[in-house]
Amino acid sequence: MTVSETSERRPAGCYIYAVADAVELSGNTIDASGLEGAEVRSLEVDALAAVISDVYKRRLRPDRRSLSSHMGVIRQVMEQATVLPVSFGVVASSEDDVRRLLAKNQASFVDQLNHVRGKVEMGLRVLWDVPNVFEYFVNTRADLRSARDTIGDIREANRDEMIELGRFFERVLGEERDRYVEQVASVLEGHGIAFVRGRVRAERDVMNLACLVPRAELGEFDRVVGEAASGFDNNFTFDVSGPWAPASFVDVTLET
């Protein structure tokens, strides 16, 4: 493609990164690079502002570079205004289409902005910090140890025996995760911290929580996490991440 052909390309649509409070965002410059290096701008409808950029194809691959650009724009905007992050890949046909979406969903978006105003999302991940999770539970759960011993030498077990032992182990993991989530939840709820339980991704993951925390109280949140961690022994690790835009606490459904 020649330079002249590139310059004459017409956008395929408007990529939507987030919906923000228009008053708070007004006057701020968004200098983060958008997808495909596009300039990012805001489009206002009454109390709402959509954070958008032009894109030249409607189907976008969620590769590392594109996801990084998407999140980079949201991170900058959340430092300037209350924000409702939009999931990756939402493309509207035109600016008029974006305006229509904002107008149609205005009441819901304003309510959600008010709900998360002044707050950020913090991740709380708890892991079993042990060399081998299965062996850890063989040593701490008599029922799993008995199931393992019934088989005898695991190296000589048949396929059906191994499948059944694996299912039993998964049930043990589920029970233990639920128990520890309840333990941490009681501490968070005792301090009025809202949270959402996310999916665990690895065997050693005990829990993956998203917590909604006032930005001005992040230091207090660290103290609360320390309080929760004090009820666990050295076989566990607590990992805090963030602050992030409160994606787990909003529902920005845009049908384009």
Image: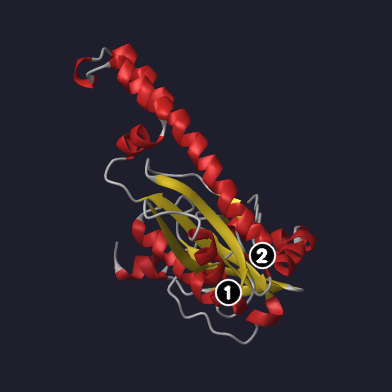
Other-residue count near label 1 (Cα within 10 Å), few / some / many at <14 / 14–19 / ≥20: few
Q: Residue furthest left?
A: 155
Q: Amino acid at mark 1?
A: Glu
Q: Position of residue 144 (x, y in %)?
A: 39, 27
Q: Secondary structure at mark 1?
A: helix
Q: Are marks 2 and 1 in contact (CB under 8 Å)?
A: yes
Most foreground residue, 48 or 1: 48
Q: Which quadrant would the N terminus be assigned to in this image?
A: bottom left
Most foreground residue, 210 or 227: 227
218 sits to left or right of 151: right
Is 138 situated above or below 80? above
Which residue: 67% across, 58% down?
189
Which residue: 68% across, 67% down?
116
Is 198 situated above or below 122? above
Q: Position of residue 171 (x, y in %)?
A: 47, 29
Q: Mark 1 — residue?
A: 220
